[in-house]
Image: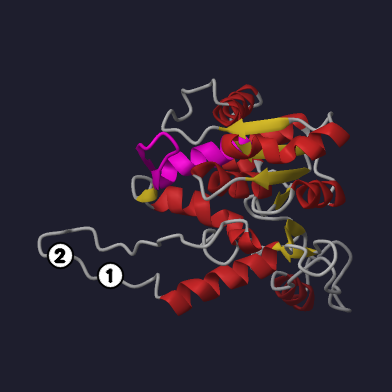
Amino acid sequence: MATSKSRLNQLVSHFLTSSSTPTPPEAPTGSSFTHRHNFHTLSPTNFLPRAAAIEPDAPAIYHVTANNKILRRTYQEVADRARGFAYYLRKHNYQRVGILCPNTPAFLESIFGIAAAGAVSVGANYRLKKDDIKYIFNHAEVDVLLVDKEFVELLSSFREAYPNVPLIVDADTNAGEGGLSDPFNAAVAEGLEFDRESGGNGWAGLQAQAPDEEAVMALAYTSGTTARPKGVEYTHRGAYLAAMGNVVESGLNMECNVNEGEEDRRCRYLWTLPMFHAVGMYSDLA
């Protein structure tokens, strides 16, 4: 029969913060109980599925496409597409994904998808010379490239040296997932199908909540003004804290002024800087 002291020790063990916390010295064998219920790794990747769960129909993207159409997507739609891309990367076991795109929905969706797949994104400045772009993607050891249709030619040097690295081309149109002639849309659709075929786990089968908040989620490179471009590692924790700080500093958690009669008081964020700059970690992930 358990003594009062052993019951008290068992109660105390419920408040241990991790498996590395020692068992109380007088606790009997088998009485310890460790958990991580009070611990939450910091990763900005979780912002997207959380937003989709809370307000799935809220506007997430308003974009003028390359074919001069207005593209609107809700948080649910963006989350689904990011999830599809994540499962596509999982299916093909891609670990480092190079990105050569302007500010497009594909770039935004891929950032979340890459991180959710447990991979690393490598966004490059499309204003660089071909040789510098080749150097960045070679140095980062990317095994697949997402490239805007407009910038495929900038990869000619890289493709000549590394012909086995596949390209996923985004045409930046308003075709959506149904336009499977666009390789990026086709990749998203393939990933969603892979999710369905493998049990339909959705976001629960991905790493929206990073197992290790200190793990690298992105590599950002300088533009090589002094010697070769230099890579900077971004961790899940660092990106999360930077994004949250930007929300507070910019007042994105405040209601915005609206015209009389308008009901939607949500703040809007007008993206102006190139998304490859710091891989967008300070803003788009919030």
Q: Position of residue 2 (x, y in %)?
A: 78, 68
Q: Which of 126 and 50 is in front in this view?
A: 126
Q: Position of residue 173 (x, y in %)?
A: 45, 33
Judging by the rendered image, the residue that carries numbered circle 1 is 256
Q: Please state which amino acid type lies under the numbered disc 2.
A: Asn
Q: Does the magenta stretch include residue 71?
A: yes
Q: Nearer the viewer, residue 180 or 83?
A: 180
In the drawing, does residue 145 fall left or right of residue 200? right
Q: Does the magenta stretch include residue 74?
A: yes
Residue range of the region highlighted in magenta in the rendering: 63-86
Q: Please state which amino acid type lies under the numbered disc 1.
A: Cys
Q: Quadrant of residue 147?
A: top right
Q: Position of residue 158 (x, y in %)?
A: 81, 39
Specify the quadrant that holds the N terminus. bottom right
Judging by the rendered image, the residue that carries numbered circle 2 is 259
In the drawing, does residue 21 fall left or right of residue 114? right
Is residue 202 in view from this perspective? no
